[in-house]
Amino acid sequence: MDSFPTLELATHGVAKGGEAVARDPDGRVVFVDGALPDERVLVEITEMKKGFHRGSVLEVVEPSPHRIDPACDEVANGCGGCDMQIASVDHQRDLKVQVVIDALERIGKIADLPAIETVALPEAGYRTNVRCIVVNGRPGFRSRRSHHPVLIDRCDVAHPLIQDLLGPDSGTTRFDGCTEVTIRVGAATGDRMVIASPSADHITVPDDVIVIGTDDLAAGKTASITEVVAGRTWQISAGSFFQTRPDGAQALVDEVRKVIGPLPSNARAFDLYGGVGLFAGSVFAEDTRVIMVEQNESSVADARVNLADLDTTIVRGKVEQWSPRRADVVVADPARQGLGRNAVSRIAETDAPVVVLVSCDAASLARDAGLLSRKGYRLDSVTLVDLFPMTSHTETVSRFTVS
Ligand SMILES: C[S@@+](CC[C@H](N)C(=O)[O-])C[C@H]1O[C@@H](n2cnc3c(N)ncnc32)[C@H](O)[C@@H]1O
C-alpha cells in the first residue's frame, strides 16, 4: 500500500477550519492540522486532492511565539471539540480576524475593507448548549483527525451546570440507550434539559433535569428551559435555536443595537431569522414597528410567548419566500449557509438604508457581502464577537448601508 509522504513545511497563513496554510516544494497549497502560521513543522500528508493537500503535524520544528500547551487535558486524549487550543486566546482572535478578512477579499471581492473590531468573552465554562455523542452510556466528542468518538471526563468550555452531567464523577448521570445527547442549560435560571436521541427511556439524570427524547419531539411533545438575556426572560424549547452562551447573546444584542444606530420615530424594522425573538425583543426602541420572520415552528411558538408584551408581528415562513415591504432597517441572522441570492433579493426589495448581518460562518458572510454589494450595499463595519474561544468558529456583526 502506498504511504503518504512526510514533509517539513513553513506555514504562512490560516484557513477557515483553523488549519495553517503552507506550500509544498511544488507550490501546492497544504492545509496543516495542528499548526499555527509562521511555524516550521514536520507534516504527514493525509489527503491528496488535485488542487491541494491536507496533512497533520508530526513535530513542531520551530514554534510560533503564540503557541501554548492546550489548557484542556482532553486535547491530548484526542478530543476534537476545540481546534484552537494550541494558540493563546488573543492570537486565536487575531487568526479569526484574518480568516474573515481573507474570506471577504477572496470570496466576497470586497475592496477597502473597514478595520475589524473584536469583542472578547470569557474562554472557559461558557457553553450552555453542548451536543455529545454517546458510547455505552457515557458522553464524548469526535476526534479531530479520525472522527472516532473520544469519551471525555470534562469539558473546559462547558458551563458548570453542564460539566456536572459529563464526567465520571457525575454520579447519577448515565445516557444509556442513546447515540447522542444535547444538553442545554439556563445560566441565569439553573434550568437543565437533556434531549436524548433516539429516546430518553433509559437515561439516568439528577431529579432537576428536564428530559425529552427526539422520538418524543417527533411525536409532538415539547420541553423547554428559560434563560435571561438583555433583562428579559426567554423560553427556549428543545426544538428552538438559541445562542450558545447567554453572555454572547448579550454581546450580540449590544453590537446589533449599536450598529443600527438611531432610527426615525415609528420606524419599521425587520428581524429576519428571528429565532425565539432575541433581537426583535431587545434591540429596538418602543415605538419601532418590528416584524420578525422565522421558519421553525418551535421557535415561532417560543417567540409568541417571549414577545407577548410587545407589539411585534411574528411571521412564520422562509425569508426567501416572504413578501417584503419598505423598511428603515433589516437585521438578518441566518443559519450557517448564509442568506444566499434569494434572501438578499428580498432584503434589497425593502429599500432599507441599513442592513445588519449577523453571520456564523466567514465564507457565508463573504458570499452575502458580495451579493449585497451587487445590490448597492456598502460594507461599513465588521465586528468579530468571539462567541467560541478555543475553536475556529467565527461570529460577526456587519453593517451595510446604501452606497
Ligand atoms: C442563527 S439562528 C438566529 C436566531 C436569532 N436571531 C437568535 O439570535 O437567537 C437562525 C434562525 O434562522 C431560522 N431559519 C433557518 N432558515 C430559515 C429560513 N430560510 N427562513 C426563515 N428562518 C430560517 C432557524 O430556525 C434559526 O432560528
Image (spheres, rainbow, N blue to C red):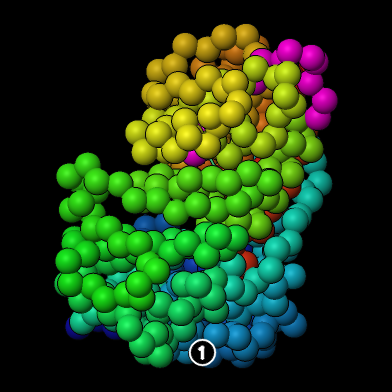
Residue 11, image quadrant:
bottom right
The image quarter containing residue 264 is: top right
Where residue 346 sits: x, y (%)?
51, 17
Residue at image position (47%, 11%) is 323
- Nearer-the-camera pick, 35 or 234: 234
Expressed as whole percent of the image width and height from the top left, the position of residue 248 reads: 64, 55
Does the closest atom of ligand 1 sit within 8 Å of the Cβ of label 1? Answer: no
Asked if residue 190 lies left or right of residue 252, the reply is left
Q: Residue at x 67, y 82 (%)?
A: 67
Residue marked by disc 1: 73
Along the viewing direction, whichever of 54 and 348 lies nearer the viewer = 348
Quadrant where the C terminus sits is: top right
The part of the chain drawn in magenta is: 261-276
Residue 202 pos. (x, y %): 18, 72
Horizontal relation, residue 310 to residue 181: left or right: right
The x and y percentages for residue 268 are 66, 15
Do we see residue 400 in this rendering? Answer: no
